[in-house]
Image: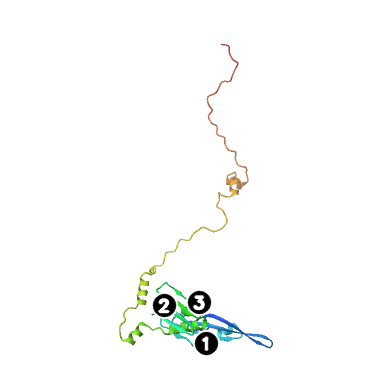
Amino acid sequence: MAEALINEEQGLESTTVKIYRTATVVKGGRRFSFGALVVVGDRKGSVGIGYGKAPGVPAAIEKAQKDARKSLRKITLLEGTLPHSITAKFGASLVKLVPAAPGTGVIAGATVRAVLELVGVRDCLTKSYGSNNHKNLLKATIEGLCSLRSKQEIMDLRGVDTGPTDVEQRLESGLRFAPAAPTSAPAEAPKSTFKRGRSRPQGRGRDNRRQSGPPAAAATGQPPAPKAIEQQPSASPVPPAGPDKPK
């Protein structure tokens, strides 16, 4: 993860790629020393790599950052991607960098990604061949980025008009299908008056169901008034049964 450098007006950020540990055997035992490989950039076209050694890790990283700031290089970019494809080699490592349309992202390993992100590349495709040594990959990526040329520079060197390039056409098509930015701020949603909690609404609790009398009588402590019994009209009276009369 990139971290901002302290007391730096250029807005530089630093990423530690690799920490090396070496041991020297002496009479009293082993003596350890650490080395740090660091990438420094401002995400606006400037990037540099540095290496430093010290008895402790923080001191090694600080030395590497100072070394990287001395070797900053200016890179030619085109709207967040590369102006053209490039292949660079350093030692036994070979890196191929290919521009991509907007929204693709940086498709690369951790070592190459550190350089591309800190230089300001947002969309790029990469592929590495040969050795995966961190130092060789970083140096090959830096050499490839430094070899980039803009369209205007190529036209000045050749003295011809090259017309729109493939990368410019990809960028144009990507911006054409990109979602348009909202012109006005969205209306704020009304705030809900519901309060989160475990309290239940009245009428659903057990205590409310057990309450038999009306709330007024329960509050005063007086017994509830007896309910009036409604008299229903009875049917026609039936004469009492008497002794059977002889026929």
Identify the residue at image location x=56%, y=83%: 36
Q: Secondary structure at mark 1?
A: helix
Where is residue 237 drawn, in percent x and y?
54, 23
> Callout 3 environment at 10 Å: few (<14), some (14 to 19), or many (20+)?
few
Question: Which of the 4 image quadrants contains residue 196?
Answer: bottom right
Foreground pick, 189 / 125: 125
Marks 2/3: CA–CA distance: 17 Å
The kind of residue tagged 3 is: Ala
Nearer the observer: mark 2 or 1; the answer is: 2
Labels 2 and 3: the sequence-earlier one: 2
Label drawn at residue 67 = 1
Identify the residue at image location x=50%, y=82%: 39
Q: Residue furthest top?
A: 247
Q: Secondary structure at mark 3?
A: helix
Q: Identify the residue under disc 2.
A: 98
Foreground pick, 242 / 91: 91
Residue 69 visible (yes or no): yes
Where is residue 49 drawn, in percent x and y?
50, 84
Nearer the observer: mark 1 or 3; the answer is: 3
Label drawn at residue 110 = 3
Above or below, 244 against 22 in this view is above
Q: Is 243 left or right of 80, judged from the image as shown?
A: right
The kind of residue tagged 1 is: Asp
Above or below, 209 against 73 in this view is above
Marks 1/3: CA–CA distance: 21 Å
Where is residue 177 drawn, in percent x and y?
37, 69
Foreground pick, 159 / 48: 159
The chosen color scheme is: rainbow
Labels 1 and 3: the sequence-earlier one: 1
Identify the residue at image location x=50%, y=86%: 69
Q: Is 68 left or right of 102, judged from the image as shown?
A: right
